[in-house]
Image (cartoon, grey):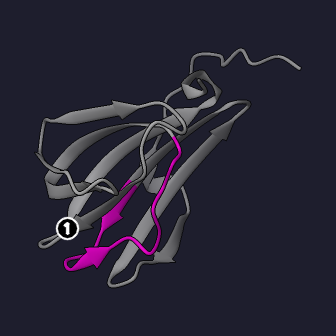
Amino acid sequence: MSTAIPFQTIDWSAIPVTIHPGESGTARWQTLQFPGLRIRIVEYSPGYLADHWCQKGHIVHCLQGAFVSELENGESVELSAGMSYVVSDQLSSHRSLSEAGVKLLIVDGDFLKP
């Protein structure tokens, strides 16, 4: 199976939205799936708190607003528009929360496996 992705543009307005409830609030995902690669625009509603601790690796870039990434070890990091974080699979348990809402670009896939 080829993992090559030919040149293409993405019209995000044409990508369907799926709703994912959090412990509080909701996450709206627009997802493109390629072999071994997932690209998403994710918007957390005001008051969003993820309903699970995630151990998947991600590259997360904050497009608008701000959010906090809590780590299960008690640390937390606030990111605002223009900031990013990256983590490989299984290297942290993390979850997101956003008081006022946020819009993110999230990329994950096989390249983040340890």
Residue linked to disc 1: 98
Secondary structure character of the magenta stretch overall: loop
- Of residue 41 and residue 16, the one placed in the foreground of this image is 41
Vertical order, 1 against 42 (above or below): above
- Of residue 93 and residue 4, the one placed in the foreground of this image is 93
- Is residue 65 found left or right of 52 in the rendered image? left
Viewport quadrant of the C terminus: top right
Q: Amino acid at mark 1?
A: Ser
Is residue 44 on the magenta stretch?
A: yes
- Is residue 43 found left or right of 5 in the rendered image? left
> Where, by quadrant of the figure, is residue 44 drawn?
bottom left
Q: Which residues are magenta?
A: 42-56
In the image, what residue occupies the spot 40% across and 32% down? 87
Vertical order, 20 against 42 (above or below): below
Most extreme residue toward the bottom, as rendered?
24
Vertical order, 75 against 35 (above or below): below
Q: Residue 43 at what x, y percent from top left?
A: 32, 62
- Is residue 106 found left or right of 43 in the rendered image? right
Viewport quadrant of the N terminus: top right
Q: Residue 90 at what x, y percent from top left?
A: 54, 39
Most extreme residue toward the right, as rendered?
1
